[in-house]
Amino acid sequence: MGTRLKVLSTFKALHRTRIAVFKEDDRALEAARLKINEEFQKNKNETSDENIKKMIKMGSDVEAVLREGVLQMEHVGDKKLLLRPRENLLLENVPYCDQPRKKS
């Protein structure tokens, strides 16, 4: 894949992730959009392949952190927060066991 195509695909992945992570939070959606666009605009004249590859790696890492590490919460009371986990963040909470259980 060409460098230009990799940059564009990283840009699109960041925006898709932003939309999924900050769903229904207009302020966070707008702030993330502005920051992504600002960083790509700031570096649009970069010509060094090495630097471009580093920035693509950085963008991919940021996208992974957003996708895997950001949770939405909403204030619903004076001292209460409502957690809104995305479907892909929910894991089954079953402890690991080496030995099968003995049926009684």
Image: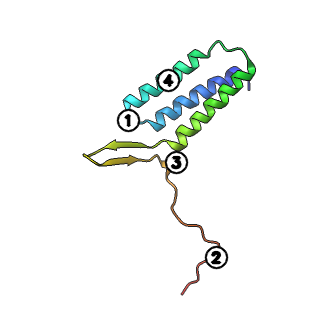
Lower position in the chain sequence, tag 4 or tag 3: 4
User: Of all residues shown, which one is farthest toward the left?
Assistant: 78
Q: Which residue is mark 2?
A: 99
- Crowd tier of the residue under label 2, counting other residues whose Cα lies within 10 Å: few below 14, some 14–19, many 20 or above: few
Q: Amino acid at mark 2?
A: Gln
Q: Amino acid at mark 4?
A: Lys
Q: Is residue 103 left or right of residue 50?
A: left
For the residue labelled by badge 3, is the local secondary structure a helix, a strand or a loop?
A: helix
Q: CA distance from mark 4 to mark 3?
A: 25 Å
* Labels 4, 1: front one: 4
Asked if the residue at tag 3 contacts the one at tag 4, i.e. Cβ–Cβ closer than 8 Å, the answer is no
Q: Quadrant of residue 54?
A: top right
Q: Quadrant of residue 98?
A: bottom right
* Labels 4, 3: front one: 4
Residue 56, how many percent across, how many down? 66, 27
Asked if the residue at tag 3 contacts the one at tag 1, i.e. Cβ–Cβ closer than 8 Å, the answer is no
Lower position in the chain sequence, tag 4 or tag 2: 4
The quarter of the image holding the C terminus is bottom right
Q: Is residue 57 above or below residue 93?
A: above
Lower position in the chain sequence, tag 1 or tag 3: 1
- Crowd tier of the residue under label 1, counting other residues whose Cα lies within 10 Å: few below 14, some 14–19, many 20 or above: few
Residue 10, how many percent across, how many down? 62, 28
* Labels 3, 2: front one: 2
Q: CA distance from mark 3 to mark 2?
A: 29 Å
For the residue labelled by badge 2, is the local secondary structure a helix, a strand or a loop?
A: loop
